[in-house]
Amino acid sequence: MEPTSDLSKFRNLNNDESNVEAVVPIAEELRRLLSSIRDYTNRIFNEPTGTLSATQLKLLNKVQKAIENMGGQIDNLFQMTSLATGSVVLMPGPIDLLHCIDEAVTQARISLSKKELALRMDFPEQIPLLEGTREPVIQIVSNLITNAVGASPNGEEVILAARVQEVEGAKFLFFTVSDAGEGVPPEDLSRVFQPIGLADDPIQGLGASTEGLSIVKNLCKVLDGRVWFDSEVGIGSTFTILMPAAEPASPSSNE
């Protein structure tokens, strides 16, 4: 019998909204417990509890990394339940992409620092406001940065870029996140946005689970946007988001 992962079981609940909604309080309790574990490990690092051996420090660093990964999976779980029940709360209006990027980069700063990754931003002088909702956009950018950080070797560079294009009188914003990873093999290209289960084989060249990338695709659809990617083995991958722009334009500030 083929093994069934917990995530694939979750997807089978999508036709029963009450079952999906029952996942939310469980995820909230997991988030609370995870916050306590994070506080305990930070206290061990920061309070004078005695000298820690090199092995103990190594183990604690692994615990912190596991906490970060679990926190990301819990965020993905919340998004999966919202998408499954159609309860994503949208408050369309002009939003500043740069503010969303700042929030996502702040969340990823520890991971960037641990891998000694440089973050380069390549934006035009003027970036139009987006027609969208702030929280889903932050989640999209955060998941793409998480993937780029995980895919890139230590000491490399993650590039965030944006450009504006006008089509038939309407303005659109193209936002890209590029990594310096291994690149996705041709035979796996069709799997990148699939919500595969934990029992499935991982994809070379990705730095995050495809659950997170599947959520990116679905959130883009909800926001009337699109996402696609280009990848070359040995070079890396670039994920591109297309979203409708609004006026007026706001000045950008490159970091």
Image: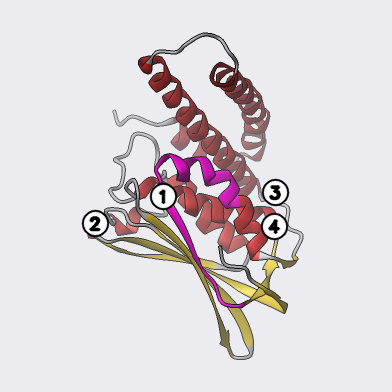
Identity of the amino acid at label 3? Ser
Residue drawn at (30%, 47%) of the image: 203
In terms of image quadrants, where is residue 159? Answer: bottom left
Identity of the amino acid at label 4? Arg
How many angstroms separate mark 4 from mark 1 (CA)?
A: 26 Å
Q: Left or right: where does residue 215 sit relative to residue 193?
A: right
Q: Indicate which disc, 1 or 2, sits on the residue closer to the N terminus.
A: 1
Identity of the amino acid at label 2? Pro
Query: For numbered disc 1, what is the local secondary structure?
Result: loop
Range of residues picked out in magenta = 104-125
x, y (%) of residue 45? 54, 20
How many angstroms separate mark 1 from mark 3 (CA)?
A: 36 Å
Q: Nearer the viewer, mark 4 or mark 1?
A: 1
- The residue pinned by badge 4 equals 134
How many angstroms separate mark 2 from mark 3 (CA)?
A: 35 Å
Identity of the amino acid at label 1? Leu
x, y (%) of residue 153? 32, 47
Q: Indicate which disc, 2 or 4, sits on the residue closer to the N terminus.
A: 4
Task: Determine if residue 207 is in view.
Answer: no
Q: Residue furthest bottom?
A: 168
Front-lying residue, 160 or 10: 160
Q: Indicate which disc, 2 or 3, sits on the residue closer to the N terminus.
A: 3
